[in-house]
Image: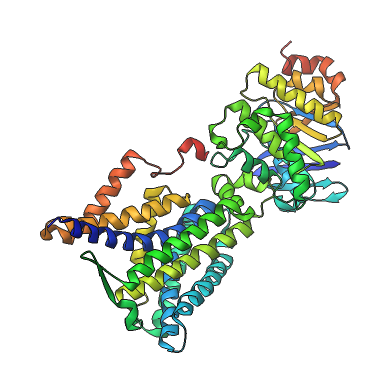
């Protein structure tokens, strides 16, 4: 579904990502784990076309997208739920969700997906006319995920969906991620809660200072002594 | 002195001036919201609109309504052109660079006008009927005053409906709030920016026509002061937020008229000093403007 080849992302002189290669297959749930500053977010931003790519290639669904603008990448079926949620606080919940479907022309399908998101997150239905800025952190995260789903993506990228949320809400959000995975949505998940991520993912990449340090099936990595020591604090 | 009639008269004058500031401020705030660009050339588009209006008004056969609508449409496209040629190549550049570029654009437009039509002010005379005075309960206003307020309110209502309900309008509000998140939604920012320049320049041209009609004159530098004051209005209301620009515009209009109307005549020469002192006070209390986002929201 998406293939990243030897990607380098640099902000000015600082390389945030150095020669990263990774792949997410159709229907897979792949996670990127690593500490702050490891280059996880920059990798996602590069796939979405909003990070400065110095070298390397990104191929989505067999087509090279390295130099395409973000709206063209969305048109190719990528939805990106960014770190820090970035919901539009001055817009209502429903307007936020409709923006997720900005490029879609099938209004019947959009309405259907709106109902689906509301079924997934009933809280959003209750608050659909409210300004998104008035929602709690957990609700904003639900909105951000719902908004990403509104494009009916072929690839869903989630950046730190558990960040700063109460355990109960994290559970709720991860059960939704698992459900989406079971429905066959291809997911690339960035998560600093490595344990949680490795539990639900098929495969994982461990990033360290901009480079891929380890890669493999999530079940193997969860038992890897190095991973346990560095990321699972055991 | 402070009879109800007198107060009513001042209110009418304030609404009148405020309407024009609001029209101008909307374009400034839309562009700032999207690009963080303080567009000093905005007032010059107002001036170009006024000149084009003058050209059409002088051609006696043009229906009055077209002398307004043709410049609006034409200046809308000029706005798109300015963005395309001067501002788009700088996308992502520091704010200071964009600011200086807009000063340059302003200077180029003004001086091109001086070179082609000279700096000589020209009379902008509308058919006599437009300046006819009406007196209702002791309060007097001209047909032009009524037109100014009516037209401004209608244009602002239309813009509000557009920004609230259309797909592009909602995208514009989203992009003003968070450009990066808007791009991740698949919004083509260049398109949204183009629409913002078109609409904003259109409103500036309308304001230019009304301004020229009110003061019966046009000259190449006429856009500078209204542009600057409208920028202040946009800041007071909360820059980047359209209702803020409208509110700020009316507030500034009222403040100017009221300071002149109610202060002893000896002070009225210091009108702008009083007005700006008041505005500073507002900014001390609400640093992001009356309807502006708090800094946390901006992040």
Question: Is residue A199 placed above or below B104 in the rendered structure?
Answer: above
B198 vs A46, nearest the viewer: B198
- Residue B281 x, y percent position in the rendering: 28, 44
Number of callouts: 0
- Residue B150 x, y percent position in the rendering: 40, 65
Question: Is residue B224 placed above or below B30 in the rendered structure?
Answer: below
Q: Quadrant of residue B272?
A: bottom left
Q: Is residue A111 found left or right of B37 in the rendered image? A: right
Look at the image and tell me whether residue B170 can be seen.
yes
A64 vs B28, nearest the viewer: B28
Residue at (19%, 59%) from the top-left corner? Answer: B5
- Residue B275 x, y percent position in the rendering: 25, 53
Q: Is residue B95 found left or right of B253 in the rendered image? A: right
Residue at (37%, 49%) from the top-left corner? Answer: B236
Q: Quadrant of residue B212?
A: bottom left
- Residue A203 x, y percent position in the rendering: 85, 27
Q: Quadrant of residue B107?
A: bottom left
Q: Residue furthest top?
A: A234
Q: Is residue A141 found left or right of A29 in the rendered image? A: left
Q: Quadrant of the N terminus of chain B?
A: bottom left
Look at the image and tell me whether residue B122 can be seen.
no
Q: How is the image coloured?
A: rainbow
């Amino acid at each position: 579904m998406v293939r990243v080849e030897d990607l380098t992302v640099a902000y000015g002189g600082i390389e945030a990502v150095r020669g990263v290669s990774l792949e997410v297959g159709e229907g897979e749930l792949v996670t990127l784990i690593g500490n702050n500053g490891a280059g996880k977010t920059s990798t996602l931003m590069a796939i979405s076309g909003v990070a400065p790519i110095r070298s390397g290639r990104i191929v989505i669904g067999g087509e090279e997208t390295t130099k395409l603008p973000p709206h063209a990448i969305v048109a190719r079926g990528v939805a990106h739920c960014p770190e820090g949620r970035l919901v539009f606080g001055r817009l209502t919940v429903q307007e936020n969700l409709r923006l997720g479907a900005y490029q879609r022309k099938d209004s019947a399908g959009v309405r259907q997906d709106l109902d689906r998101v509301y079924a997934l997150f009933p809280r959003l239905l209750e608050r659909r006319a409210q300004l998104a800025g008035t929602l709690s952190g957990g609700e904003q995260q639900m909105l951000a995920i719902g908004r990403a789903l509104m494009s009916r993506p072929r690839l869903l990228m989630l950046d730190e969906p558990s960040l700063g949320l109460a355990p109960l809400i994290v559970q709720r959000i991860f059960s939704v991620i698992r459900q989406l995975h079971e429905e066959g949505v291809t997911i690339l998940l960035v998560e600093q809660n490595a344990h949680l991520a490795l539990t639900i993912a098929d495969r994982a990449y461990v990033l360290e200072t901009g480079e891929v340090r380890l890669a493999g099936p999530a079940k193997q990595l969860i038992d890897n002594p190095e991973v346990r020591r560095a990321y699972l604090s055991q | 002195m402070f009879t109800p009639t007198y107060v009513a008269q001042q209110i009418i004058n304030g609404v009148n001036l405020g309407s024009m500031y609001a029209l101008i401020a909307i374009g400034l705030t839309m562009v700032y919201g999207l690009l963080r660009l303080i567009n000093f050339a905005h007032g010059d588009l107002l001036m170009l609109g006024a000149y084009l209006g003058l050209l059409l008004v002088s051609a006696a056969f043009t229906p009055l309504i077209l002398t307004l609508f043709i410049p609006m449409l034409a200046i809308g496209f000029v706005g798109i052109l300015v963005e395309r040629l001067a501002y788009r190549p700088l996308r992502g550049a520091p704010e200071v660079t964009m600011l200086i570029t807009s000063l340059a654009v302003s200077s180029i437009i003004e001086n091109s006008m001086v070179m082609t039509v000279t700096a000589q002010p020209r009379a902008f005379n509308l058919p006599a009927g437009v300046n006819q005075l009406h007196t209702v309960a002791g309060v007097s206003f001209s047909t032009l005053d009524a037109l100014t307020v009516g037209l401004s309110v209608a244009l602002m209502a239309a813009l509000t409906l557009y920004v609230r309900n259309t797909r592009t309008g909602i995208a514009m509000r989203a992009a003003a709030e968070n450009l990066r998140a808007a791009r991740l939604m698949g919004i083509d920012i260049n398109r949204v920016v183009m629409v913002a320049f078109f609409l904003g320049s259109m409103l500036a041209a309308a304001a230019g026509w009304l301004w020229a009609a009110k003061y019966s004159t046009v000259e190449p530098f006429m856009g500078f002061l209204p542009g600057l004051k409208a920028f202040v209005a946009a800041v007071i209301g909360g820059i980047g937020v359209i209702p803020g620009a409208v509110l700020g515009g009316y507030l500034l209009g009222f403040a100017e008229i009221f300071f002149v109307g109610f202060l002893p005549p000896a002070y009225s020469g210091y009108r702008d000093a009083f007005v700006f002192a008041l505005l500073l006070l507002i900014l001390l209390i609400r640093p992001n403007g009356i309807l502006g986002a708090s800094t946390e929201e901006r992040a």
